[in-house]
Image: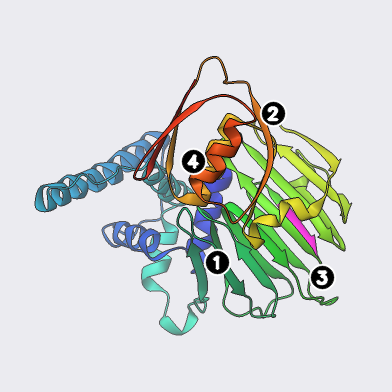
Amino acid sequence: MTKQAISDLLERYLAGRCSREEREWIDQWFDQQEPVTTALTESDADRLAEEILAAINERTVAAERRTGMRVGRKAWWRGVAAAIVLLAGAGYLLVSQRDSTPAQEQLPVRSVFTLHTEPGQRARLTLPDSSVIWLNGRSAIRYDKVFDGAIREVFLDSGEAFFEVQHDPTRPFVVHAGEVDTRVLGTSFNVEVANHRNEYQLTVATGKVSAGTAEELHVPATVLEAGQQLVYNRKAGSHEVRTVDPADYSAWTRKVLVFHHAPWPEVAARLSAWYGVDVQLQLRRGAQETFTARFEDPSLAAVLNALQKINKFHYTINRKEVRITD
């Protein structure tokens, strides 16, 4: 987990906006500590992180023994442990303050709506300001149930979403997606956080938007108009602005599947999110092939059969598994 991700987790916890699972683990760890005010040394921080991870692993093993099922040990928990240690490393004073602050002095806990869509699932959400979000499969989004601040904020943690934002000149609408923040007053645009290719993609359908990374470290504040697309490669730290047909990038909201010079990894990721299948690529000769095609509410077999006419390959479908070979 990056420093920014750790910082985001701490901010959500202190603002009362983290998930129930995150909050329970952090609260339980806090409750087991003695309130002191000395800062942690680096060795103390390492020791605490290992203690937290050991406790998590112990519970995981116990759960496996009770249920006979294997519980996934996500690297995400190491990030939680690191976040807790980072918080404690700033001084155990925060622990004692949490236990001793009178209830009436506690900040109010904000009510946050969170949605994770499954592969093959799509959702339409209406926000408190009547803006609309279309959420694609295998995506995660969260926002306050009440927009009562100076800005309207939405966090797209993964996947893809199309936004139709109600115009409000007094309160900008901000989408936080990975390292990039997109700020608008009223417009429509598509955002994709493509983790499988380390890429952030913003496509403007109507109006104007401003997008950039924090402190303009990687992407300077860039104004985009309808028909323009910002692509930021997180691995390379580079970005570019393209001219595109925005209808192609919101087509998924109308159950239209579109490929634009898509290489096999992109095709596999799209099929996985669209149909909820595990696509296994076992290609050698055709690994560098690309596909350009458009399908309206198609079946999985129909898509694969049509793609076979563009580039030669073989496929098998076994329930939720698709295997593609030369």
Q: Is residue 31 left or right of residue 152?
A: left
Mark 1 closeness class: few <14, some 14–19, many ≥20 residues within 10 Å = some
Give 260 or 43, whichever is nearer the viewer.
260
Residue at image coords 45%, 48%: 83
Task: Return the disc, 3 or 1, that comes first in the chain's sequence.
Answer: 1
Counting residues from the start of the chain, the first of labels 4 and 2 encountered is: 4
Dominant SS in magenta: strand
Q: Is residue 268 above or below residue 83?
A: above
Q: Label 1 sits on what residue type?
A: Ala
Q: Is residue 34 above or below residue 132?
A: above
Assess whether mark 2 and mark 4 are in contact (beta carbons under 8 angstroms). no
- What secondary structure is marked by label 2? loop
Name the residue furthest bottom: 104
325 horizontally vs 126: left or right = left
The image quarter containing residue 201 is top right
The mark closer to the camera, 3 or 4, is 3
SS under mark 3? loop
| Dot 1 or dot 2, earlier in sequence | 1
Which circle, 3 or 1, is nearer the viewer? 1
Circle 1 sits on which residue?
123
Q: Amino acid at mark 4?
A: Met
State which quadrant residue 100 falls in: bottom left
Look at label 3 and name its amino acid. Gly
| Magenta-highlighted residues | 181-185
Q: Earlier in the sequence, mark 3 or mark 2?
A: 3
